[in-house]
Structures are given as structure tokens and as C-alpha cells.
Image: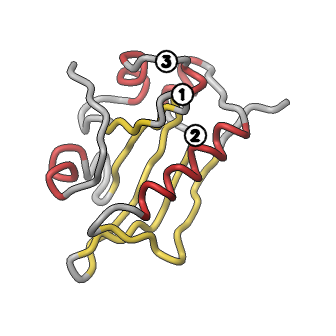
Amino acid sequence: MEIKSIEALSEELLREFGDRKTKGRLDLVYNIDSGKFYPVPKDVEHKDFMPHLEGNPESLIPVQLRMHKENNEQIIDALSVGASGFEAMYKVAHSPADIKEAYNQALVWLNSQAGFKISPKVEIMHAYAKCR
């Protein structure tokens, strides 16, 4: 499996990786240590994909986007950070600080993407963290 980080969101990227499991869904993994985002292939589960990424498992944070197209823009309606089948399968938990950093970096990155807009009513679906 060839794994490449992405610099930008695009219609081409959405055709290849988007509509994962449901229409309008795009799953990414944010590596806290490198600051890079990796798209999760449509036909691969997080629990099978994430072990191929380099880095400490606790530093690999899932980021899920839900979006719809409106007036030639992709509108991001929901953002889920820190939870996937990988965490459940391997009992991985992320620090609250890492969850917050992944969330903040996702917002900064998403706001810089041409043709994509974060809805002012974006729903934060989940943010799982380990207890201290």
C-alpha cells in the first residue's frame, strides 16, 4: 500500500478517497509529530491503514469530515477527531492536548483550502481522549 501525505484538498482527492462508507465523508489521519495529513483509502479500515503510518500510534489522530456540495463549494458540516476502529482495536487513546492540536490544525488547514468552506454550524461529532 502506497501512503502519501496530502498538501491540499481537491475534487480529484475526493473522487479517490471521498464518499468513504457514506456520501460526503472523507477520513484523514493527522500525524501530530510531522504535521501531515494522510487520506484513508475508501476500501481500507483505519485499523488496517494506521499501522502502515510511521510514528507513535498515540500521535496518529483520525480526522473525519462530512461535507456536501453547494454552489460549486464543498461545505464541511461535521468534524470528528480522535476516534476510529484503530483506537478500539488496539486500545489506543490520545492525550487531550493532542486531540485539541489535531482539531485546531484541521481547522487551520481546512480554512486554507480553495473551494472548501467550513459551515458556521459545523458539528463536532466526537473528540475522544485518554483520562489522566
In-image side of 77 versus 9 (left or right): right
Q: Amino acid at mark 2?
A: Gly
- Determine whether the residue tagged by mark 3 lies in a helix, strand or loop: loop
Residue at the (55%, 17%) spot, across then down: 56
Q: Amino acid at mark 3?
A: Gly
Foreground tag (1 vs 2): 1
Return the mark for residue 33: 1
* Nearer-the-camera pick, 81 or 101: 101
* Mark-to-mark CA distance, 3 and 1: 7 Å
Question: Can you tell which mark lies on residue 42?
Answer: none
Mark 2: secondary structure: loop
> Where's residue 49, x and y in %?
36, 24
**Vertical placement of residue 103 versus 96, above or below:** below
Quadrant that contains the N terminus: top left
Secondary element at tag 1: loop
> Measuring 28% from the left and 66% from the top, which residue is drawn there?
114
Residue visible at 24% across and 33% down? 43
Disc 2: CA contacts within 10 A as few (<14), some (14-19) or many (>=20)? many
Query: Which of the two discs, 3 and 1, labels the residue nearer the N terminus?
Result: 1
Left or right of residue 77, residue 13 in this image: left
Distance of label 1 from label 2 (alpha carbons): 15 Å
In the rendered structure, find residue 82 and report the number of the disc placed on it.
Answer: 2
Q: Mark 3 or mark 2, which has the lower sequence index?
A: 3
Image quadrant occupied by the C terminus: top right
Crowding at dot 1, Cα within 10 Å, few <14 / some 14-19 / many 20+, comes out as few
Amino acid residing under circle 1? Asp
Q: Is label 3 in contact with label 1 (beta carbons under 8 Å)?
A: yes
Q: Residue at x 28, y 58 (%)?
A: 23
Residue identified by numbered label 3: 55
